[in-house]
Image (cartoon, rainbow, N blue to C red):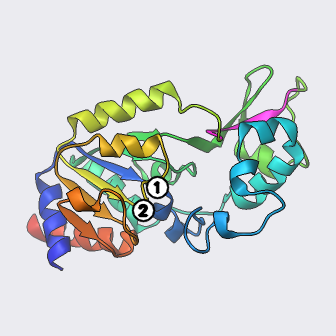
Amino acid sequence: MEDVSFLAGLLCKARRAVFFGGAGVSTESGIPDFRSTDGLYHQQWRYPPETILSRTFFDRKPEEFFRFYREKMLFPDAKPNAAHRALAKWEREGHISAVVTQNIDGLHQAAGSKNVVELHGSVLRNHCVRCGKSHAMEEILHSGGVPHCVCGGVIKPDVVLYEEQLPEDAIESALNFIDRADLMIIGGTSLSVYPAAAFAAAYRGPLVIVNRSATQMDERADLVIRQPIGETFEAVCRQMDMNQK
């Protein structure tokens, strides 16, 4: 309870807080993460997920790529959870300036967050590698084999694969929000994915980490909470509402 009250107090004072999140934010919506004991990286496949989700593999074995992608990366029925809803609420109330996410599921926007920086892209956006035409996720989901545009080009998800660079606009936007932040909350990430994790490491102000496992930044955090993020954020919302009465 003390941890919840402390975080609620920090957020009540904040006007430009930034939330930096990873896969653990969406696991409570039924989307599996990669690196936990039952995550994708610990499941058995013909090829390791790191290999399948690389640009080389996409170009050389697109049918294998899309078989994995449809089964393990697309969750059209997933809904925002308590953590997503709390972040959208704090943005509306003027406490949070942006969400910087490593996730590709679009659930922050579905919950109502407006300023969302997607470092690794989104499954909701797809484009033809030949003509550049945009395509909806449903076209990928309901097509068979390798999805093709009307021009004959392969449709590629707008997600950052291994061997690809992060989008320049996302990098610039994330760094701008973090540079102006008066509080950073890191949640649902082990901070082991680079270069994204380096953005969080560059922050030097008040820092809170909400993650079930240890991270490399725990020692310099002002507060570390080892509870489920949705449950924690719900409790913080209640405390903030009480503080404002």
Quarter the C terminus occupies: bottom left
Task: Pick the residue in front: 54 or 5.
Answer: 54
On screen, residue 101 versus residue 242, left or right, reads right
Residue, x 60% and y 66% (percent of image)?
A: 32
Q: Which residues are magenta?
A: 153-161
Residue, x 31% and y 67% (percent of image)?
A: 233
Residue 154, magenta (yes or no): yes
Element at label 2: loop
Residues at circles 1 and 2 in contact by the CB criterion of under 8 Å:
yes
Residue, x 49% and y 49% (percent of image)?
A: 193
Q: Quadrant of residue 227?
A: bottom left
Pinpoint residue 181: horizontal percent, then vertical percent.
22, 40
Q: Residues within 10 Å of mark 2 (few under 14, many from 20)?
A: many
Q: Amino acid at mark 2?
A: Gly
**Label 1 to label 2: alpha-carbon separation:** 5 Å
Pinpoint residue 97: horizontal percent, then vertical percent.
27, 42
Pinpoint residue 185: horizontal percent, then vertical percent.
28, 55
Instruction: Say which residue label 2 marks.
Output: 188
Q: Amino acid at mark 1?
A: Gly
Q: Residue furthest bottom?
A: 1
